[in-house]
Image (spheres, rainbow, N blue to C red):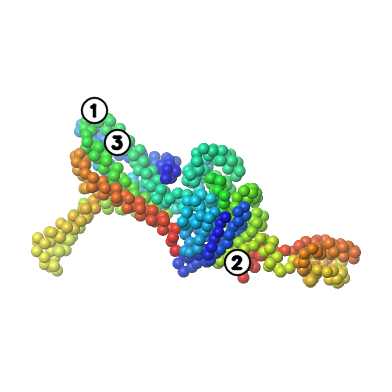
Amino acid sequence: MIEITNLVKRYGDKKAVNGISFTVQKGEVLGFLGPNGAGKSTTMNIITGYLSSTSGTVKVNGHDILEEPEEAKKCIGYLPELPPLYLDMTVLEYLNFMCDLKKVPRAGRKEMLAKILSMVRIVDVADRLVGNLSKGYKQRVGIAQALIGDPEILILDEPTVGLDPNQILEIRKLIRNLAKDHTIILSSHILSEVQAVCDRVVIINHGKVAAIDTITDLSKKLSGSSKLLLSFKGPVKEVRNALQALPGITGINERISDSDIHEIDITISNEKGSDVRTSIFYAMSKGGWPILEFRSLDPTLEEVFLSITSA
Amino acid sequence: MFAVYKREFFSYFRSPVGYIALALFSFLSGLLFINQFGSGAVSISSEIISLRSFFVVIIPVITMGLFAEDKKRGTEILFYTNPLSLFDVVLGKFLAALSLLGVMFLNVIVHMIITAVNKGVVDIGTWGSVIVYFFLAMLFISIGIFASALTDSQIISAILSFIIILIIQLISTISTLAASSVSSFLSSKMFSMDAEKVSKAVEKVSNGIKWLDPFSKTQDFRYGIFSVAPLVFCLSGALVFLYLTYRVLEKKRWAQN
């Protein structure tokens, strides 16, 4: 669907984007992560045709963005970092103007607009001036704008920035809904957001791709093996002996020890077909040591992100 | 192109700019007309020609926001990421400003009707002045649009187009000044040229500068003497500035700094 090959954008001596390549499959939601200044927005601006790359190609649905810009741009709905809104128009006027810009045929336009308005929930502000809307509503009008003309691909640059927690949840829900029949590239530095909606992530740093993978694979790759956290009441030495006897457990580390409540890290090998958790449970219950907390310690995207971008 | 045109034209009336420009123009043209009407000898041509001298204020005001505002608000990204060509955008904005000027000109049309009804003179020369008015307007609007594309500040854009239009309006004065300074420079002891040679050189300089003057080129139109060359001059000048505007916008995409 989108094919990016060896993208380079040079600003003076500095390369803002330095040889980025990746592809996005149809129907996929791709998270685009990176610290500020990593080149996220520049890359998105190049994909949408706002900027030209110094070298490298972008193909959207088989159309090169430089050679067949009109065809390529027709497939893309773009929400830039700063939503491109005309503050002196009402929401409806603005969306109609966008229909004109995107050459949406007049027939069926009204139905399409009604659908979009209700989808992003701005029906009640449709006749108000964009300039008088709150930030959350403006952001939604920005998303509505990207949806006009029913493009197959949506490119959203930090869609939830500056919104309150309720609005963030709503927008995320909206994105998940859109993901059903759109291909989406979503940039963000809010990791939980990416974790919540994306199938795959591309992490970029200093203009280069630092990692491309699904979120679960990424965290597994990083830790090498999985870890479990177990907190219990009982004698730590005996527990350690009992657990070490179980197959599949490769290491035990003590984290915190109170007088009689202990927390330990259990490192397990990632062999398929064996679930150590059951045998741990039975071993603990056999010894009569109550389990207080028991959870998997897969690194969160935060940890993955930090370890990749600080390396 | 039509989408951009429609938006820009109506946006004049969503802010005070369009109304202020309209009010100012109605006031000035009304004042000129009433003066003539009171004295009993109305010449619409001279009213139009007097109105032309207000281009230097009116055109910077109506063109200053055309691109500068888009840049400041971030809406210019729409022109790059939607399926339309940048030249269509430039043309749409140009026609919007020209249309606003056309709406303002309705005042003068009313004056023409009043004059004609009162058995005054509305002849071919009057229409000649109207034609010149719009061709000059095209030239100056394109200059204003160019200035607007250079910056994201409306004030700087207005000042820039004000200066360029002022210089064009003062070309005949400038040519006289240049001629006299060239003459005094060449007649100084340093060169010791004879008077004939000096006057020839002076004439060349002043003619060269005057060639750029769209006002003197079109001055015969008010007497009903039409020619194509001055119109082509204005139109190609307008196209040059519109093309430069297009290049400025296009450059942004390729800029490497």
Q: Which residue is mark 1?
A: B118
Please state which amino acid type lies under the numbered disc 2: Ala
The secondary element bearing badge 1 is classed as: loop
Q: Are marks 3 and 1 on the same chain?
A: yes
Q: Position of residue B232 (x, y in %)?
A: 26, 48
The span from disc 3 to disc 1 (Cα, nearest Å) is: 15 Å
The secondary element bearing badge 2 is classed as: strand
Q: Chain of mark 1?
A: B
Q: Quadrant of residue B249?
A: bottom left
Instruction: Say which of A129 and A278 sits in front.
Output: A278
Which residue is pictured at 56% across the width and 40% down the height?
A112
| Sequence-first tag of 3 and 1 | 3
- As drawn, is A238 to the left or to the right of A267? right
Do the residues under discs 3 and 1 have CB atoms within 8 angstroms?
A: no
Q: Which mark is residue B91?
A: none
Q: Position of residue B105 (x, y in %)?
A: 32, 38
Which residue is pictured at 85% across the width and 67% down the height?
A260
The span from disc 2 to disc 1 (Cα, nearest Å) is: 82 Å
Please state which amino acid type lies under the numbered disc 3: Val
A123 lies above or below B184: above
Instruction: Say which of A291 and B212 sits in front.
Output: B212
Question: Which of the image's four quarters has the N terminus of chain B?
Answer: top left
The secondary element bearing badge 3 is classed as: helix
Q: Which residue is mark 3?
A: B108
Which residue is pictured at 37% across the width and 50% down the height?
B145
Q: Position of residue B148 (x, y in %)?
A: 38, 52
Residue B238 seen from this side: yes
Which one is in front in this view, the residue at disc 2 or the one at disc 1? 2
Q: Which mark is residue A210?
A: 2
Please state which amino acid type lies under the numbered disc 1: Asn
